[in-house]
Amino acid sequence: MTKPVGASEKNVGDDAVREATGKGRDEWFALLDAAEATGWKHRDIASWLVSRHQVDPWWSQSITVAYEQARGIRSPGQRQDGTYEASVTRTVALEKAEALRALAAVVGIELGIEPLALNLDAKNATARFPLDGGEFVLASSTGRPGRRASIGLVWGRMPDDARLAEVKSRMRDWLKAVG
C-alpha cells in the first residue's frame, strides 16, 4: 500500500537541493547530525541552516522537514505542532476567482457548511471552512487574469494520520468536480 502523504524527499529531488544549496541532503544531514540537531526544535534547525550556512529560507524549510522525517522526528504529513495535514492540487481552465467560487461551492455542499471566510481579491484567493475539533479545509486558487487557475485544498489540524488516505481521496474528488 502506498502512503497517502509522501516523504519530503520524494517531492524535491536531491539534484535540486544540491543545485540550490551547494550540498545534497546526505551532506546537510551529516552536518545537522554533527551539530546534534535531532534535539532541536524545527525553527532552530531552519534558522541554523540560514544563519550558519546561508541557505535560502525556503530551502532551509525543505531540508529541515526532510531531516526531521529521515530521523523519525516527524512523519510525512505531520506539521510542527504535531497535527497532520493533507493537500491536493489541480489546474483548471477557469479564471482565478471563478475557480475559487466553483471550488468553494463544491466544498460547501460536500461539507454541508458555508465558508467562514471567502477572499476572492487576494493574490492567493482562499475560502476557509472550519470543522469540528479544530480541523479545517482551506480552498485556494492562484492564477493570472484570463489564464488557467491552479486550485488546491488543504485539510488541516487532523490529530493523527489515520484518515490521510481517505481525506486525500475525498478532496481529489472535489477537485475533479470543478471545471
Image: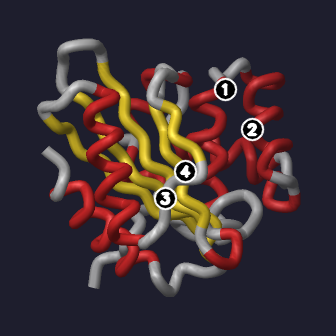
Real-space Cα separation, disc 1 to disc 4, in angstroms = 27 Å
- The amino acid type of the residue labelled 3 equals Glu
Give the label on residue 27, or none.
none
Q: Is residue 140 above or below residue 87?
A: above
Tell me which corner region of the image, top left, top right, bottom left or bottom right, holds residue 49: top right
Real-space Cα separation, disc 1 to disc 2, in angstroms = 7 Å
The residue pinned by badge 1 equals: 57
Real-space Cα separation, disc 1 to disc 3, in angstroms = 35 Å
The residue pinned by badge 2 equals: 46
Specify the quadrant that holds the N terminus: bottom left
Which residue is drawn at the image coordinates 36% and 75% (left, top)? 3
- The amino acid type of the residue labelled 1 equals Pro
Q: Is residue 166 above or below residue 113?
A: below
Q: Earlier in the sequence, mark 4 or mark 2?
A: 2
Q: Earlier in the sequence, mark 1 or mark 2?
A: 2
- The amino acid type of the residue labelled 2 equals Ala
Give the image location of residue 152, x and y in percent: 36, 46
Q: Earlier in the sequence, mark 1 or mark 3?
A: 1
Neighbours of disc 3 within 10 Å: few (<14), some (14-19), many (20+): some
* Contact flag, marks 1 and 2 (Cβ < 8 Å): yes
Neighbours of disc 2 within 10 Å: few (<14), some (14-19), many (20+): many
Q: Is residue 159 above or below residue 8?
A: below
- The amino acid type of the residue labelled 4 equals Arg
Q: Is residue 96 above or below residue 71?
A: above
Q: Secondary structure at mark 2?
A: helix
Q: Secondary structure at mark 3?
A: loop
Neighbours of disc 1 within 10 Å: few (<14), some (14-19), many (20+): some
Give the label on residue 128, or none.
4
* Contact flag, marks 2 and 3 (Cβ < 8 Å): no
Res. 70 visible in picture? no
Real-space Cα separation, disc 2 to disc 3, in angstroms = 37 Å
Neighbours of disc 4 within 10 Å: few (<14), some (14-19), many (20+): many
